[in-house]
Image: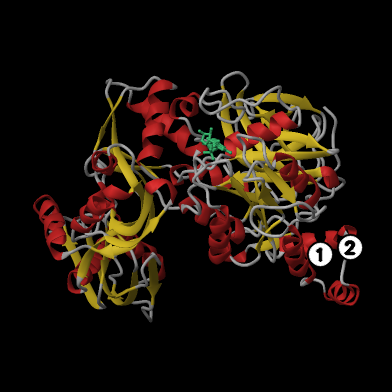
Amino acid sequence: MGSFDTQHIRTIALIGQGGSGKTTLLESLLASTGAIGAAGSIERGSTVCDYDPREKEHGHSVKLAVTNITHDDTLVHLLDTPGYLDFVGQSLPALSAVETAAIVINAASGVELMTRRMMQWAKSRDLCRIIIINRIDAEEADLGKLLKDIQAEFGPECLPINLPANNSEKVVDCFFKPDGESDLMPVAEAHTALVDQVVEVDEELMTVYLDQGHITPEQLHEPFERALREGHLVPVCFTSARTGAGIDLLLNSFSKLMPNPTEGNPPQFLRGEGNAAKPLLAEPDPSKHVLAHVFKVEIDPFIGKLGVFRVHQGTVTPNTQLFIGDARKPFKVSHLYRLQGKNHVEIDRAVPGDIVAVAKVDDIHFDAVLHDSQEDSHIHLKPLDFPQPVFGLALEANRRGDEQKMADVLHRLSSEDPTLRIEHDTNLNETVLRGLGDLHLRLTMEKMEKTFGLQLSTRPPRIPYRETIRATADGHCRHKKQTGGAGQFGEVYLRIAPLERGSGFQFVDESKGGVIPNQFIPAVEKGVRSVLEAGPLSGHKMQDVKVTVYDGKHHSVDSKEVAFVAAGRKAFIDAVGKAKPVVLEPIVDIEVMAPQESIGDINGDLASRRGQVGGNDALSGGMMKLTGKVPLAELDNYQSRLKSMTGGAGSYAIEFSHYEQVPPNVQQQLVAVHKPAHQED
Ligand SMILES: Nc1nc2c(ncn2[C@@H]2O[C@H](COP(=O)(O)OP(=O)(O)O)[C@@H](O)[C@H]2O)c(=O)[nH]1
Ligand SMILES: [Mg+2]
C-alpha cells in the first residue's frame, strides 16, 4: 500500500446519535472509493465497522472502528463511533485522533442528545466540525426545518455547502460549482452566504471581495481553513447512505475542504503533571522526533493485543524504537498496520496524520504517549472529559474459585474502557461494577460471560450516595490510653467547613508552636481521611469538606502515630456530628424517546419518582422526546417499565448531572440501615 505525505492525509471521526447512519455512511464511502467491493448493511450484519459479534447481535456499534479510503490522491482516515451515551468511552477517544469531527444527524429525528453532547465535546477540543444530515431519503424528513433548528441550536455559522434537490433524490453543490436548483433555497444564495462567512476571517480578502464582488476558489482556500479552525464556519452537507445521494460531494468535501494535519488546530499535548503542566507543541513534521498517542486498545482474536495510535510528529517505521510514556525500555515496532475494520494491512511508514496499529506489545495502554527519545518524559494529551460512571451492579462469580479470574477480567476490561470503574465495598465484601448505563453494563457482562467464560450473578444497582456537611463546626479529641508500660497520647482541635459541591476534600494545618509536632500532622490527616471512606452518618463516602487543624497537645514519650491517627479520626467525627451532616444522591439527566400517546404516562411516572420534567418536544413520525432530571435511585428497572408503558417502542439515555441532598425520609432510612451495625465508641 502506497504511503502519503502529511499534506495528502485527512483524519475524520464520524460522531453523533445512534441510528443516524454513521456505519452505513462509511460503508457507502468505502464502496464508492473501491476500498470494498460492495456496501454491506447493518441488517445483514455485514459492515466493515460493526464486526464485533455483539454489534451484529444488537444491530448497532458498540466500539470505535478504524478505516481508511483513498480519494483524489488523498488518504482519508475515517473513524466510526458508537452513538449511545453508554459507549462514549469508545466514542470520545476518536476525538483525540483527528482534525475533523463529522457530526451525523438523522434527517428524520433531528438534533438528539448525542448530537448536542458530541458537538460540545468536539468544540471543547478545538476540532474543525462538519455536520452531515443523513437519511434525506426518509419520507418524514423536513430538511428546511431541520436546517433552521441546527442554526438556532449551534449558531448561524452552520451553513450548507451543498443542498438536496429533486425531492432529495440528489444533492447539488453550492460551493465549488454553484448551479442547478435545490429543494431548499436558491443555490446562488447559499453560495453567497458561505463566501460572506469565510471572508469575515480575512480583512484584506474582505476588501478585495467588496471591491470586485467575487473571489476565486483558490483565494478562499486559506481563509476557509481558518474559518473552520476558529469555528467561524461549520459546513453542513446532505446525504443518503441508502440511495447514495450526496456521497460524491461528501467525499470531495473531505478531501478538498477539510483540513490536513498541518491546517487543523494542533493537538493539546502537555508536559509535566497537574497545575505545573505546560503546553507542548507537536509539529506535524516527519523529520522530527516521534510523538504519537494511543487512543484505542483492542484484543484481536488472531494477532493479540492491538495498540492503535495517531502519529502527531515524526515518522514511525518497522525499525523505530518507541518508548511508552515514562517507561525506561523501548519496544521495536517490527510490524506496522493500517486498519480496515477488523482487517489489517502491513505498511512500512507512518507520518504525521497517520493512524496505525502495532500488535502484541503488552505494556501498551489506552491514552499512552509513544515517543522515540529517552529524554522526553511526563508527556500526555489533554485528558478527555468522560462522564462519571454512576450506574452500578454488584457482581458475584457463580462458581467457587472464579473470584480471582473475575477480578483479572474486570481489571483487563477496565483498562480498555475508561468509563468502567470497579469498586470493592469492604463492609459488604462486594464487588461493584460501575458504568454509564444499563446497556453499557449489560454488554460488559455479556463479554465477561461469552468471551471469558465466567458465570456471574448480579444484584440490583447500588446507588453511590455521598455524605457532606452544611455548617461549620469544631471538633475535639483527647486520645489517651495507658496499657501496661508505654501509653498513647494525642490531642487534636479542628474546625470543619462545607466546600462547594464537587470540590472534594481539603486538609489544612494551622496549629502553631509545635503543639502537634510536624511529623504527626500526616497521622492526623490519615485519621481524618479514614472517615472520608465511610461517613459517620450513613457509611457513604464523604465529600466537599475542608478540615483545618488549629490546636492540639502532645506528650514527649507517649505521643506516637497511632495516637494522632485516633485523635484526628475522632475529632473529625465529633465535628461532623455538629455540622448538620446530610446524605447526597446522584441526580441524572434523562432523555426519553417514546410514541406521543405514551408521553402522558411517562411524565406521570417520572413525577411520581421525584423527577422533574424539563421539556417535551415533538419529533417526526409520531414520536416525542422528553427531557428532565431524576434521582438515579428511582431508575431501578427503568428499561422494563418504559417497555411496558410504550409497548416496547420507548428508549432512554441518562447522564450524571450532580449530587443533591436526599429528602428527609430517604435520609432517615439510610441512617437507620447504617446505625445499628456501626456504632462508634
Ligand atoms: N432510509 C435510510 N436509512 C438509513 C440511511 N443510513 C442508514 N440507514 C439505516 O439506519 C439504521 C442505522 O444505521 P447505522 O449505520 O447503524 O447508524 P449508526 O448508529 O449511526 O452507525 C440502519 O437500519 C440503516 O440501514 C439512509 O441514508 N436512509
Ligand atoms: Mg454505527
Which amino acid is tagged 2?
A: Gln
Secondary structure at badge 2 equals helix
Q: Position of residue 520 (x, y in %)?
A: 36, 65
**Residue at left offset 14%, top offset 65%:** 664
Q: How many marks?
A: 2
The circle drawn on residue 483 is none
> Viewed as shown, does residue 615 lie left or right of 76?
left
Place of residue 10 in the rendered image (x, y in percent of width and height, measured from the top left): 76, 45
Asked if the residue under mark 2 is in contact with the one under mark 1, i.e. CB atoms within 8 Å, the reply is yes
Q: Residue at x 82, y 72 (%)?
A: 202
Quadrant in the picture for residue 577: bottom left
Q: Is residue 26 above or below residue 491?
A: above
Q: Name the one closer to the observer, 192 or 334.
A: 192
User: Residue 223 has which mark?
Assistant: 1
525 relative to 219 in the view: left or right: left
Q: Indicate if the residue with disc 1 has its beta carbon within 8 Å of ligand 1.
A: no
Question: Which quadrant holds the C terminus?
Answer: bottom left
Q: Quadrant of ligand 2?
A: top right
Q: Which of 411 and 616 lies nearest the eye of the viewer?
A: 616
Drawn side of residue 318 relative to residue 144, left or right: right
Q: Classify mark 1: residues with Cα within 10 Å, few (<14), some (14-19) or many (20+).
A: some
Location of residue 131 in the rendering, given as x and y in whole percent from the top left corner: 63, 52
Give the answer, above or below, for where 462 lies relative to 361. Answer: below
Residue corresponding to mark 2: 219
Q: Circle 1 sits in a helix, a strand or a loop, which is it?
A: helix
Name which residue type carries label 1: Pro
In the displayed orientation, state which residue is furthest to the bottom: 513
In the rendered image, which quarter contains the N terminus?
top right
Residue density around tag 2, few if under 14, some if 14–19, many if 20 or more, within 10 Å = few
| Residue 304, above or below 498 | above
Q: Is mark 2 within 8 Å of ligand 1?
A: no
- Between 374 and 54, the residue placed more toward the observer is 54
